C-alpha cells in the first residue's frame, strides 16, 4: 500500500521535508523515475504586457511573451508537463475592457494551458460574457462546486479531468469561491455555490478509487488563508480538513509565498499548497517523481521546497 | 460497516492482487520562477499580441475633448468641479435612456467621492483619461426611493461631510452640520413621493456604507458603465470647464 509519512526538517535556506518509512532506500534501488511537472499561474488579471520600468511594485516583471518562452524551455527539458491556471484570468487592463477576455483565452491556448478554474472576476462581464469567450479557449474549464445547470455554462465546464501522462494518472478538480456578496448576482445569475469541503471529499473519492489516479491536484480560487475570518474556507483550511490531495494550486488572495506551504492533512500526511502572487509575475513549478519499482513496500516521499 | 465501505475494501484487495506496476510517489520539488526581463521574448506570441496592443493604444490616445484647467476631487469642501461634472454627466447621459424605457425622469444622482481615482489634467482628454478617472466597471442603477428614505440619504451626506458627487440635489448645512435646506430639482422633498435616484451598482449594494438604497420599490439597471458615460460626454464636448457651485454648501 502506498504510504506517505513525512517528517519536516528545516535546514538553512530551504526546507527539506524528508523521508518516512524506509526512506532513502527507494533512491538506492535501480528503479526508474517518471517525472511529472506541474506549472501554474493564478490571478493574471489580463496582464498580457509586462510592467514597465516605472512600475513601483513590479518593475519589468511579468508579460505573456516571456512566460511563453519560459514554458517552452521547460517543456523541452521535461515534456511530461501540465500547465494550469487557478482563475481570475479576466479584468485588470484595457485588454479585457476592449476584447472581453478574447486575447487572454487565445494566448493561454497558444501557451497550451491544459486547464483552468473559474475565478470571481471571470464573471465581470457576466456569465454570458464568459460564455461568449469560450470558443477562444482550447483548454478545459474545471470547477466542481459551481452548479451551472440553470445557466449558459451548463455542460461547458467539468468538475474534474484526468490527464494520463507517461503512464501517470493525474486527477485535477476545481473549486471556486462563494460568489454571493462578492459578485453582483446579475452577473452569475443562477450559478449555485456548493460546499467546497463536501465537494472535495467527493472528488477525492472519485479520483482515487473510481479513476485510480496516482496524483490528485485541486485547482482552487478559494484564497490562501483569511487570518481575520478563520471560519472562512481557504486553501489552508481545506488542506487540513481533507485527505488524498497532493497539491492545492490556489488563487484569489494574490498571495506571494516564499515557497510552497507544506500542510498536514486530516490523516496527518503532508501535502502542498501553493500560490504565485498575481499578474503573471511568477510561474509556479512543482515536480513529482514517481518510482515504478513496486518491490518497495514502504517507500516514503520527500518534499523539497 | 457501510455497504460502500465494503466495496472500497473489495476494490483495494482486487487492486493489490493484480500484477500491474504500482507507482510510488517518491519525491516532490517545488520552486517559483520569476518572470523578468532576463527571459527572452517569444516572438510569435509578441507578434500575435501586437495588433491588439496597437489598436488599444490608438483608441485610448485619440483626443476626445480639451480640459480648460486641472481639476482635483480635493478642490472643494462639499462639492468639487470634477465631481459635479461626473454627476451631471450621469444625469444628462442616463436620463434619456431611463425615460425612454420607463417614461419617468431621474430625480437626482449620487456617486461616491472615492470613485474618482485621478485628477482631470489641463489639456487634451483621451479615452485613457476616462479610464484613469474611473477605472472601475461599475454601471448605472436607478433606484426608486420613498421620500422618507430620502431623509436617510440626506442624513448620510450630512454626517459624512464629504464631497460625494451629486446632481439635481441641493443641500445646505448650518455650522452644526444640520440640514437647513434640502431640495430636489428645486422642490422640497415630500414624504409621499417616490424619487428615482441614479447611482452605481457598487453603492447600491452597500458600498461606502450607503445602506439607504435597500429596501426599495424597484431598481433599474441601465447596463451603462459610468466610465462609458464619461467617454460619451467627452465626445459631445469641445472644452470641459466645470465649476464648484452651491449644490452642497455649509453656511456659517
Image (cartoon, coloured by chain):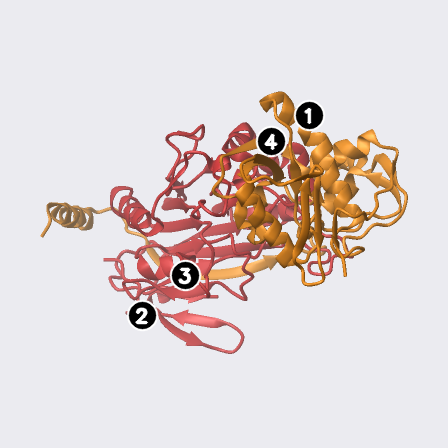
Determine which residue is flagged by label 4.
B223
Q: Are marks 2 and 3 in contact (CB under 8 Å)?
A: no
Residue B96, which numbered label? 1
Determine which residue is flagged by label 2.
A20
Of labels 4 and 2, the one closer to you: 4
**Marks 4 and 2: same chain?**
no
**Marks 1 and 4: same chain?**
yes
Of labels 2 and 3, the one closer to you: 3
In the foreground, B252 or B201: B252
Q: Are marks 1 and 2 in contact (CB under 8 Å)?
A: no
In the foreground, A257 or A96: A96
Residue B190 found in image quarter:
top right
Q: CA distance from mark 1 to mark 3?
A: 51 Å
Chain under numbered label 2 = A
Q: CA distance from mark 4 to mark 2?
A: 59 Å
Q: Which color was chain A given? A: red
Tell me if I can see residue A76 in this picture: no
Q: CA distance from mark 1 to mark 2?
A: 72 Å
Sequence-wise, the earlier of marks 1 and 4 is 1
Amino acid at each position: 500500500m502506498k504510504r506517505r509519512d513525512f517528517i519536516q526538517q528545516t535546514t538553512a535556506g530551504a526546507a527539506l521535508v524528508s523521508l518516512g518509512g524506509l526512506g532513502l532506500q527507494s533512491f538506492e534501488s535501480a528503479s526508474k523515475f517518471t517525472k511529472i511537472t506541474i506549472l501554474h499561474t493564478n490571478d493574471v488579471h489580463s496582464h498580457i504586457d509586462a510592467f514597465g520600468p516605472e512600475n513601483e511594485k513590479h518593475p519589468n516583471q511579468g508579460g505573456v511573451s516571456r512566460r511563453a518562452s519560459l514554458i517552452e524551455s521547460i517543456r523541452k527539458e521535461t515534456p511530461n508537463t501540465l500547465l494550469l491556471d487557478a482563475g481570475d484570468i479576466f479584468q485588470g487592463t484595457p485588454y479585457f475592457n476592449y476584447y472581453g477576455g478574447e486575447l487572454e483565452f487565445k494566448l493561454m491556448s497558444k501557451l497550451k494551458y491544459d486547464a483552468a478554474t473559474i475565478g470571481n472576476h471571470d464573471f465581470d462581464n457576466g456569465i454570458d460574457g464568459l460564455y461568449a469567450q469560450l470558443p477562444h479557449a482550447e483548454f478545459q474549464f474545471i470547477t466542481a462546486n459551481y452548479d451551472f445547470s440553470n445557466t449558459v455554462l451548463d455542460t461547458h465546464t467539468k468538475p474534474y479531468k484526468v490527464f494520463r501522462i507517461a503512464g501517470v494518472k493525474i486527477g485535477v478538480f476545481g473549486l471556486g469561491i462563494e460568489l454571493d456578496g462578492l459578485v453582483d448576482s446579475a452577473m452569475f445569475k443562477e450559478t449555485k455555490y456548493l460546499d467546497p469541503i463536501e465537494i472535495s471529499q467527493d472528488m477525492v473519492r472519485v479520483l482515487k478509487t473510481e479513476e485510480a489516479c496516482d496524483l490528485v491536484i485541486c485547482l482552487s480560487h478559494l484564497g490562501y488563508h483569511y487570518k481575520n475570518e478563520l471560519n472562512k474556507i481557504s486553501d489552508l483550511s481545506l488542506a487540513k480538513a481533507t485527505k488524498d490531495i497532493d497539491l492545492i494550486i490556489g488563487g484569489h488572495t494574490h498571495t506571494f509565498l516564499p515557497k510552497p506551504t507544506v500542510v498536514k492533512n486530516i490523516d496527518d500526511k503532508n501535502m502542498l499548497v501553493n500560490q504565485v502572487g498575481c499578474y503573471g509575475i511568477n510561474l509556479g513549478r512543482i515536480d513529482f517523481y514517481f518510482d515504478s519499482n513496486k518491490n518497495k513496500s514502504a517507500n516514503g516521499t520527500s518534499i523539497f521546497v | 460497516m457501510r455497504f460502500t465501505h465494503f466495496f472500497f475494501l473489495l476494490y483495494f484487495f482486487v487492486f493489490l492482487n493484480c500484477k500491474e506496476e504500482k507507482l510510488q510517489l517518491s519525491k516532490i520539488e517545488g520552486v517559483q520562477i520569476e518572470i523578468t526581463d532576463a527571459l527572452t521574448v517569444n516572438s510569435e506570441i509578441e507578434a500575435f499580441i501586437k495588433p491588439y496592443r496597437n489598436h488599444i493604444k490608438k483608441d485610448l490616445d485619440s483626443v476626445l475633448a480639451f480640459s480648460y484647467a486641472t481639476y482635483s476631487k480635493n478642490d472643494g469642501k462639499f462639492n468639487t468641479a470634477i465631481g459635479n461634472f461626473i454627476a451631471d454627466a450621469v444625469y444628462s447621459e442616463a436620463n434619456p435612456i431611463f425615460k425612454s424605457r420607463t417614461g419617468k425622469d431621474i430625480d437626482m444622482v449620487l456617486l461616491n467621492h472615492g470613485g474618482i481615482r485621478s485628477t482631470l489634467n489641463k489639456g487634451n482628454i483621451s479615452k485613457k483619461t476616462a479610464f484613469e478617472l474611473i477605472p472601475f466597471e461599475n454601471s448605472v442603477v436607478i433606484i426608486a426611493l420613498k421620500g422618507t428614505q430620502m431623509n436617510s440619504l440626506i442624513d448620510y451626506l450630512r454626517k459624512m461631510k464629504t464631497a460625494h458627487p451629486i446632481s439635481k440635489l441641493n443641500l445646505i448645512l448650518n455650522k452644526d452640520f444640520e440640514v437647513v435646506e434640502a431640495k430636489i430639482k428645486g422642490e422640497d422633498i415630500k414624504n409621499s413621493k417616490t424619487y428615482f435616484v441614479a447611482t452605481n451598482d457598487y453603492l447600491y449594494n452597500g458600498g461606502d456604507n450607503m445602506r439607504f438604497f435597500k429596501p426599495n420599490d424597484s431598481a433599474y439597471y441601465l447596463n451603462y458603465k459610468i466610465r462609458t458615460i464619461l467617454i460619451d460626454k467627452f465626445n459631445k464636448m469641445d472644452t470641459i470647464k466645470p465649476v464648484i457651485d452651491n449644490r452642497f454648501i455649509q453656511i456659517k
